[in-house]
Image: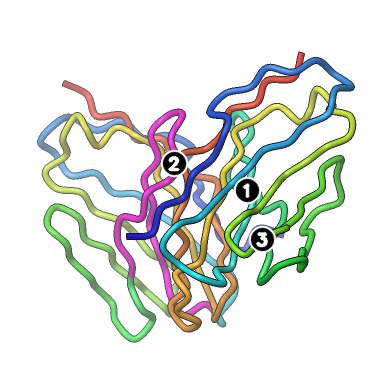
Amino acid sequence: SQTIHQWPATLVQPVGSPLSLECTVEGTSNPNLYWYRQAAGRGLQLLFYSVGIGQISSEVPQNLSASRPQDRQFILSSKKLLLSDSGFYLCARSSGDFYQETQYFGPGTRLLVL
Amino acid sequence: DQQVKQNSPSLSVQEGRISILNCDYTNSMFDYFLWYKKYPAEGPTFLISISSIKDKNEDGRFTVFLNKSAKHLSLHIVPSQPGDSAVYFCAASYRDKIIFGKGTRLHILP
């Protein structure tokens, strides 16, 4: 089976501190991977997607960056967190069906910036 | 510009009755539509989908209806159960692109 792991599950960080959230995928090779943010009262905002190692596309300009150092690893980072970075961060992988795209989500990381 | 719209932020339904969640889209290129269910502090889980060549897809208590001419889809849950209380996201895709709505919070009342 294909499983998505995210850690940490929750994180409380002060403003200005760095961030590193990790996502790993099991059971599939060369998946398309995605980072989403769900902020309070808002929907799912696509932040980054990656079609392969070292290939990152950013959907919105922001304080965050992403990297894909290995095929099944996707990392979300920030050098200096802002209060507005608080939210629920979700990693997702593509089903790989080009014509019937379905995405499957990890358990999420809740980030609170104080 | 929101391509996928869920105009009802929340919905309350009596247990045992039918829950109807609505979704509208603007891009006629979308050809595959999905519903996800999300509990607090968990990732969304895939619920049901429908291809644009169909107008209905049923899976147990869940049925999705697609009206292409109106660019509208709906999710029917019948009968509604307490465990159905969650946020429901509508999504639309074309090839490998998928766009999510902002979600509707469903409350099932006892």
Instruction: Look at label 1 and name its amino acid.
Output: Tyr
> Which of the 4 quarters of the picture holds residue A77?
top right
Kindly indicate whether the residues beneath marks 1 and 3 are on one polypeptide chain. yes
**Residue A9 versus residue B29: which sits nearer the camera?**
A9
B77 is higher (above) or lower (below) than B42 = below
Residue A70, numbered label: 3
Rendered-image quadrant of the N terminus of chain B:
bottom right
A29 is higher (above) or lower (below) than A23 = below
Residues shaded magenta:
B30-49
Instruction: Look at label 3 and name its amino acid.
Output: Gln
Q: CA distance from mark 1 to mark 2?
A: 18 Å
Residue A36, numbered label: 1
Residue depicted at 77% across the width and 32% down the height: A19
Q: Secondary structure at mark 3?
A: strand
How busy is the neighbourhood of tag 3: few (under 14 within 10 Å), some, or many (20 plus)?
A: few
**Residue A56 versus residue B24: which sits nearer the camera?**
A56
The spot of residue B90 in percent (x, y) is 45, 56
